[in-house]
């Protein structure tokens, strides 16, 4: 059976153009020195548990369907697990990660790579790049458990590898997708419960579109055409510290509210040093729609909401409360779920309307930057028989969105990974140090 990219994943694949790459990155720092051959042996022994990583994408004939997954008959682990050299220090590591973020993955092979770097202080870095079209943050963490961590969940795999599809298969897929959409519509309209849900969604939709897709973001220094070079920076803190800040707030706040408030503080410091206006910045916050124990390998299953970061507010506690109130409203009104249904419906109604809506949703007047937050394993992890010391996540920027911030929590730490267009953002470390200061000031004031 031929397996194809979902429509959502195909759209993500198509975003990779010009100077914008399509991959995300996990930076894992492990105790001890571990040569690339040891990492190759580990992954070679486990890769059957993640069959997607042995599959490459093949375009459909005449482009009439989304690309299909096929087994890479020339798969060799050394193509994907590479010797990054070393030993290197912290600044050299950041420079190498930034270089790798700007380097495209090879589309003629499975869309992932791990560069193994020896670090000062008897440590090893694994720089794992994984294309966003085959894994969102939640799926990537599942892959990490199966592929890398010493304690992992086994998964069943099929004995039959995907075969290369032809034109007949593409036509069958296209017809089946259309028939499936029609059949799904008929099944849905036969359900009174669905009628009620659709009616509620239709009533909510205009207000949701105004809140989430209204062109309300201000012009900002981040609105730049994407350059070819990247810069990265990292911040981490004890997760308990962030939880204590959330619990100590005078109104209900979550860990993600604290994350967004910390980002607001970091941006405020950077804008102030640059002499730019400290106006509100509108952030796009991905919302995972994955459910525990779900079946299937769908890479991307999420929606989003947009939140105004109150950068102009002078007090860190006031910034946190403003963020918490806005996210609480968005969640209460189910904006993310309504948006997901809206885009799904458009895909069945009109491809041209869907493309227009997607283009609109990526406008820098809809949002300024993307800040994602994915939970990792809460318990300490070991890899190659050694302690996992640090885990960071990075995500690629987009056209006219020169900064992207990815947050991951794991083993009692919460870590911020900042990826920026090096030509658009001067002194990225100012934003990182501002995030650290904001967390410290919030901890002291609440």
Image (cartoon, rainbow, N blue to C red):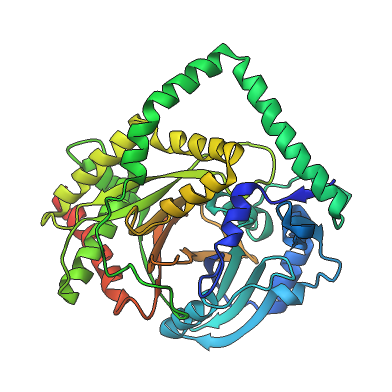
Q: Which residue occupies 88% across, 49% down?
A: 159
Residue 352 visible (yes or no): yes
Q: Quadrant of residue 230?
A: bottom left
Taking 267 as reference, is 416 left or right? right
* Quadrant hosting residue 45: bottom right
In the rendered image, the quadrant that contains the N terminus is: top right
Asked whether 422 or 238 is in front, the reply is 422
- Residue positioned 73% across, 57% down in the render: 63
Q: Residue at x 53, y 50 (%)?
A: 355
Q: Position of residue 194 (x, y in %)?
A: 55, 18
Please name whichever residue, 402 or 258, is drawn nearer the observer in this view of the structure.
402
355 or 156: nearer the viewer: 355
**Image location (x, y in percent) of residue 247:** 26, 40
Across and down, in percent, residue 257 comes to: 30, 46
**Going by the image, does 39 lie left or right of 191?**
right
Q: Is residue 69 above or below residue 428?
A: above
């Amino acid at each position: 059976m031929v397996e194809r990219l979902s429509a959502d994943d195909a759209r993500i694949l198509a975003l990779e153009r010009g100077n914008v790459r399509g991959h995300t990155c996990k930076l894992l720092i492990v105790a001890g020195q571990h040569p690339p051959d040891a990492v190759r042996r580990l992954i070679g022994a486990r890769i059957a548990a993640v069959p997607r990583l042995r599959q490459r994408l093949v375009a459909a004939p005449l482009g009439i369907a989304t690309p299909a997954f096929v087994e890479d008959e020339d798969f060799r682990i050394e193509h994907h697990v590479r010797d990054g050299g070393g030993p290197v220090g912290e600044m050299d590591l950041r420079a190498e990660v930034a270089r790798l973020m700007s380097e495209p993955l090879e589309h003629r092979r499975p869309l992932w790579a791990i560069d193994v770097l020896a670090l000062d202080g008897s440590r090893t870095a694994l720089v794992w790049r994984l294309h966003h079209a085959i894994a969102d943050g939640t799926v990537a963490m599942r892959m990490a458990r199966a592929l890398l961590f010493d304690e992992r969940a086994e998964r069943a795999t099929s004995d039959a590898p995907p075969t290369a599809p032809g034109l007949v298969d593409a036509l069958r897929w296209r017809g089946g997708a259309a028939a499936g959409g029609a059949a799904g519509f008929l099944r849905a309209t036969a359900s009174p419960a669905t009628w009620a849900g659709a009616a509620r969604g239709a009533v909510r939709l205009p207000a949701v579109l105004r809140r989430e897709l209204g062109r309300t973001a201000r012009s900002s220094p981040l609105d730049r055409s994407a350059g070819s070079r990247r810069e990265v920076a990292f911040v981490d803190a004890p997760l308990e510290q962030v939880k204590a800040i959330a619990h100590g707030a005078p109104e209900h706040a979550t860990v993600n509210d604290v994350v967004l408030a910390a980002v607001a503080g970091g941006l405020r410091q950077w804008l102030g040093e640059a002499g730019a206006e400290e106006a509100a910045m509108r952030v796009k916050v991905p919302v995972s729609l994955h459910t525990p124990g779900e079946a299937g390998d769908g890479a991307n299953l999420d929606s989003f909401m947009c939140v105004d970061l109150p950068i102009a507010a002078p007090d860190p506690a006031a910034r946190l409360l403003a963020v918490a109130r806005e996210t609480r409203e968005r969640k209460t009104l189910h904006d993310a779920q309504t948006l997901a249904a809206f885009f799904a419906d458009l895909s069945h109604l009109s491809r041209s309307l869907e493309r227009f809506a997607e283009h609109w949703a990526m406008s820098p007047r809809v949002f300024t930057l993307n800040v994602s937050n994915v939970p990792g394993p809460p318990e300490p992890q070991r890899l190659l028989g050694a302690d996992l010391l640090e885990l960071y996540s990075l995500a690629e920027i987009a056209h006219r969105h020169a900064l992207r911030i990815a947050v991951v929590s794991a083993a009692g730490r919460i870590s911020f990974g900042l990826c920026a267009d090096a030509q658009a953002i001067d002194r990225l470390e100012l934003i990182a140090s501002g995030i650290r200061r904001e967390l410290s000031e919030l901890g002291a004031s609440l």
